[in-house]
């Protein structure tokens, strides 16, 4: 695994997604229950940044058509989304969030 620095833990607020770019990849970071998660930041249904969506109960809602994804697994949870989003391994070292693409 090759982990890449994504952000400082102090930049990430509980229940507020944070958009970051790692190379060519658009990533959304989430702090949920004290844990940090990373997913691809683009909805699989139509282009919209998930980091602009609403986060609740461990899910991120697409701001365009209100499809929901499970933040931990990437699973598509309701129409119109049917395809999961990619999730990435995360580790936190000191105040640094590292993501493995």
Image: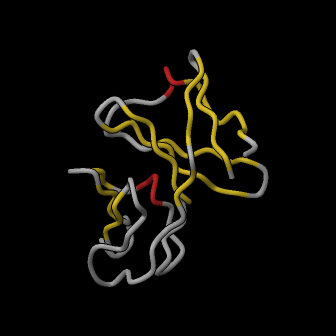
Q: How is the image coloured?
A: secondary structure
Quarter of the figure with residue 32: top left
Which residue lies at the image location 28% right of the left edge and 34% below the top edge?
A: 33
Indicate whether 9 appears above or below 61. Answer: above
Expressed as whole percent of the image width and height from the top left, the position of residue 93 reads 59, 21
Q: Which is more toward the observer, 52 or 5? A: 5
Is 97 placed above or below 79 here? Answer: above
Name the foreground residue: 55 vs 63.
55
Q: Residue 28: x, y in percent?
A: 52, 50
Q: Residue at x 39, y 34 (%)?
A: 35
User: What residue is drawn where x is 29% and y is 83%?
Assistant: 79
Res 69 → quadrant: bottom left
| Residue 58 versus residue 76 in the image, above or below | above
Q: Give the x, y percent position of residue 73.
A: 40, 60
Left or right? Give the position of 18 relative to 93. left
Side (left or right) of 33 relative to 92:
left
Residue furthest out toward the front: 1
Residue most extreme to the top: 94
Query: Hey, which quadrant is residue 90 in on the image?
Result: top right
Place of residue 29 in the rendered image (x, y in percent of width and height, measured from the top left): 50, 43
Q: How many marks?
A: 0
* Residue under the image location 50 percent in, 79 percent down: 46
């Amino acid at each position: 695994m090759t982990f890449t620095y994504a952000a400082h833990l102090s930049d990430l607020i509980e229940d507020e997604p944070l958009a970051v770019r790692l190379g060519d990849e658009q990533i959304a970071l989430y702090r949920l229950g004290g844990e940090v998660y990373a997913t691809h930041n683009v909805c699989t249904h139509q282009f919209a940044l998930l980091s602009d969506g609403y986060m609740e109960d461990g899910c991120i809602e697409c701001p365009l058509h209100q499809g929901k994804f499970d933040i931990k697994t990437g699973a598509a949870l309701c129409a119109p989304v049917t395809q999961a989003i990619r999730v990435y391994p995360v580790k936190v070292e000191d105040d640094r969030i590292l993501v493995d693409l």
